[in-house]
């Protein structure tokens, strides 16, 4: 597949992988589709050359597939090679981005066909799950993705900020490429379900469109051990938090002490929380404003391989479960997947669809959101997203770890 110049042709349309020679067309489609103007980029501190070559590394380190019409790029999809923590198991993940089509080519099924090839590619690469940030949730649901995490934005008035809490350490402002800052995130991500394991490409995406005023501050213990950080900027008397991560309560208190120390400079603190749980309960004045919205969507790419590596909470050797899956985009995911355990190891076989005991019937979207922990089996059963015998719900609830995904990245 990788060695084929054209994967598919249809009249004057031809599908192939993009290379660095396609950089100008790649940039032009991205900026047209996502309405990013040169003037807007210049205002955030970019130079003309930086704008042109900002996405060049993507073509070298990612898989970019496109439809060309008479040699001109018409539609494309980008797959970033990434890793994500799934209940303490680090999985290879395909990060989907750059899904774009010029309007004159819409309605021809170009993205749909690109999606099918992308799924085949990710399966070949061992990327058992895929994440994306949706521009249209209904559209991506049709392709097999489902909501997997939430973003909770909050607004806190200066008078509502937490009072000073004594801690033994202190906060220090650091450079954006500070090793301690990056190490805190790595340690956090390795122990937090759903978190992206950031490599060089992921860090580049993390900063790509931020302005030059972004600041990173790290909380250090009394032994100068980095235990947390906050990334932020201040504008128009508002303290904007891009991300706040802490490894224990000491760091949490220390970072809020630091934020509260700006109360004479700011009137509001605005930010986002990706834990899936509101923050208000932890504040003395809990009447802060919080707004919840869906954030990242996920999709299991290869059901059998994902089930084999999934860290089920219990491994009962006397249990057999049949996950009967429907996937309209990836035929290898259709069928009955028998899951059982031996010597605490998960085993999975695709069997004939003639079982009547311990069957859980569901589509790929529901299987994804359930195993990711975003929605529990009982909730999905009550809303007719899965079919099974009622006794199976208690078994599923025990098997699937109880933790909502944390995902704070954007690409």
Image (tube, rainbow, N blue to C red):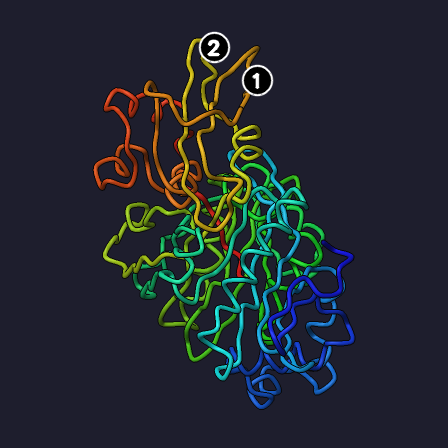
First along the sequence among labels 1 and 2: 2
Q: Which residue lies furthest to the bottom in this view?
A: 39
In the rendered view of the protein, which quadrant contains the N terminus?
bottom right
Q: Point out residue 30 in the picture as x, y percentages from the top left corner.
A: 58, 77
Q: Residue at x 28, y 41 (%)?
A: 385
Q: Which of 22 and 264 is in front in this view?
A: 22
Q: Which image quadrant is residue 370 in?
A: top left
Residue beneath label 2, please? 317
Structural crowding at the residue carrying mark 1, measured as other residues with C-alpha within 10 Å and reported as few (<14), some (14–19) or many (≥20) = some
60, above or below 101, in the image = above
Residue 257 visible in rendering = yes
| Marking on residue 159 | none
Q: Which residue is drawn at 56% across and 59% down?
A: 96
Q: Point out residue 103 in the picture as x, y percentages from the top left corner.
A: 48, 82
328, above or below 72, in the image = above
Residue 188 visible in rendering = no
Residue beneath label 1, please? 345
Q: Which image quadrant is residue 204 in?
A: bottom right
100, above or below 277, in the image = below
Is 269 positioned to the left or the right of 289 in the image?
right
Is 287 positioned to the left or the right of 311 in the image?
left
Is 109 positioned to the left or the right of 141 in the image?
right
Structural crowding at the residue carrying mark 2, measured as other residues with C-alpha within 10 Å and reported as few (<14), some (14–19) or many (≥20) = few
Q: What element carries label 2?
A: loop
Q: Nearer the viewer, residue 302 or 110?
A: 110
């Amino acid at each position: 597949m990788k060695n084929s110049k054209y994967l598919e042709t249809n009249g004057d349309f031809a599908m192939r992988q993009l290379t660095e020679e396609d950089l100008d067309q790649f940039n032009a489609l991205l900026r047209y589709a996502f309405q990013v103007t040169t003037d807007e980029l210049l205002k955030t501190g970019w130079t003309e050359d930086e704008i042109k070559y900002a996405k060049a590394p993507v073509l070298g380190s990612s898989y970019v597939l496109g439809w060309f019409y008479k040699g001109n790029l018409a539609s494309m999809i980008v797959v970033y090679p990434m890793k994500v923590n799934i209940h303490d198991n680090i999985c290879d993940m395909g990060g989907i981005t750059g899904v774009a089509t010029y309007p004159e080519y819409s309605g021809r099924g170009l993205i749909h066909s690109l999606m099918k090839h992308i799924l085949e590619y990710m399966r070949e690469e061992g990327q058992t799950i895929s994440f994306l940030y949706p521009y249209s949730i209904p559209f991506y649901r049709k392709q097999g993705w489902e909501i997997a995490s939430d973003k909770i934005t909050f607004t806190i008035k200066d008078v509502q900020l937490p009072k000073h809490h004594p801690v033994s350490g202190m906060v220090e402002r650091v450079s954006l490429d500070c090793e301690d800052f990056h190490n805190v995130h790595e340690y956090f991500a390795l122990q937090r379900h759903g978190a992206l394991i950031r490599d060089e490409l992921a860090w580049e995406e993390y900063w790509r469109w931020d302005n030059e005023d972004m600041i990173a501050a790290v909380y250090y213990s009394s032994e100068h051990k980095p235990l947390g950080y906050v990334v932020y900027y201040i504008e128009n008397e508002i303290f904007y938090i891009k991300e706040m991560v802490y490894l224990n309560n000491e760091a949490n208190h220390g970072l809020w002490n630091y934020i509260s120390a700006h109360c004479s400079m700011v009137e509001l603190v605005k930010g986002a929380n990706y834990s899936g749980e509101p923050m208000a309960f932890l504040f003395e004045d809990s009447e802060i404003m919080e707004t919840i919205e869906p954030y990242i969507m996920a999709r299991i790419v290869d059901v059998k391989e994902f089930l084999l590596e999934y860290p089920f909470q219990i491994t009962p050797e006397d249990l057999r479960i049949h996950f009967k899956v429907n996937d309209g985009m990836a035929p290898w995911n259709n069928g009955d997947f028998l899951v059982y355990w031996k010597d605490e190891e998960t085993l999975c076989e695709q069997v004939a669809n003639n079982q009547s005991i311990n069957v859980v019937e569901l589509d790929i979207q529901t299987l994804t959101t359930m195993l990711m922990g975003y929605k529990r089996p009982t909730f999905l059963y009550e809303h007719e997203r899965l079919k099974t015998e009622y006794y199976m719900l208690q078994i599923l609830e025990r098997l699937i770890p109880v933790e909502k995904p944390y995902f704070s990245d954007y690409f």
